[in-house]
Amino acid sequence: MDIGEWLERGSIVGHSAASNKKQALAALAELGAKAFGLNAEQAAEALMEREAEGSTGVGYGVALPHARLKGLEKMRAAFVRLEQPVEFDAVDDQPVDLLFALFAPPHADSEHLRALAQISRRLRHGDLRERLRKAQTADAIHALLVQSAEPVAAKPSAA
């Protein structure tokens, strides 16, 4: 399983002006609609429903919103970097500026969980988070997210 299988360059926005959690989730849903033909309204609703169960803000300015959507045949991902961090009820009470969303087919139980775990492990690394925050283009963000985890994993995590 590889992040590059779900994340395409066209599903990355490097500068979003969303000013709150709801707008950030809506931006991810709109991005999914453009990149994958999702219904933006249904995707936003599914992301909000999942968020109502508990925040997907995992700490260090990162959130991993996710939803299962009818009509998807395979896992898809979208990434949004916010211009200004927003309150997200994250586990560390810090605002979020890096959002990596997973959209999964209804039947992708174990694949969905493995994908969440994989991206969570990648984004635990402070060096990667900082490089994502400084990246100038969607291509640069894509390269950082899909590159082999070995070089990043070899470095100790920085908070």
Image: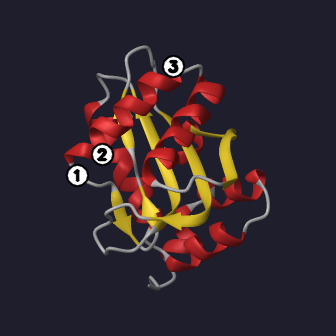
Q: Residue at label 2?
A: 51
Q: Nearer the viewer, residue 6 or 32?
A: 32
Residue 88 bears which disc, if any?
A: none
Q: Residues within 10 Å of mark 2 (few under 14, many from 20)?
A: many
Percent x, y of residue 69: 38, 23
**SS label for mark 3:** loop
- Mark 1 or mark 3: which comes first in sequence? 3
Amino acid type indicated by mark 2:
Glu
112 versus 71 height, above or below? below
Q: Name the outermost residue toward the left.
A: 53
Q: Name the outermost residue toward the top.
A: 71
Q: Residues within 10 Å of mark 3 (few under 14, many from 20)?
A: some
Q: Residue at label 1?
A: 54
158 versus 65 height, above or below? below
CB atoms of marks 1 and 2 within 8 Å: yes
Residue at 59% x, 60% y: name it: 148
Residue at 51% x, 39% y: name it: 26
Q: Residue at label 3?
A: 39
Q: CA distance from mark 3 to mark 2?
A: 18 Å
Q: CA distance from mark 1 to mark 3?
A: 23 Å
Displayed quadrant of residue 62: bottom left
Residue at 31% x, 63% y: name it: 89
Q: Nearer the viewer, residue 158 or 62?
A: 62
Can I make out residue 2 in this image? no
Percent x, y of residue 38: 53, 21
Amino acid type indicated by mark 1:
Gly
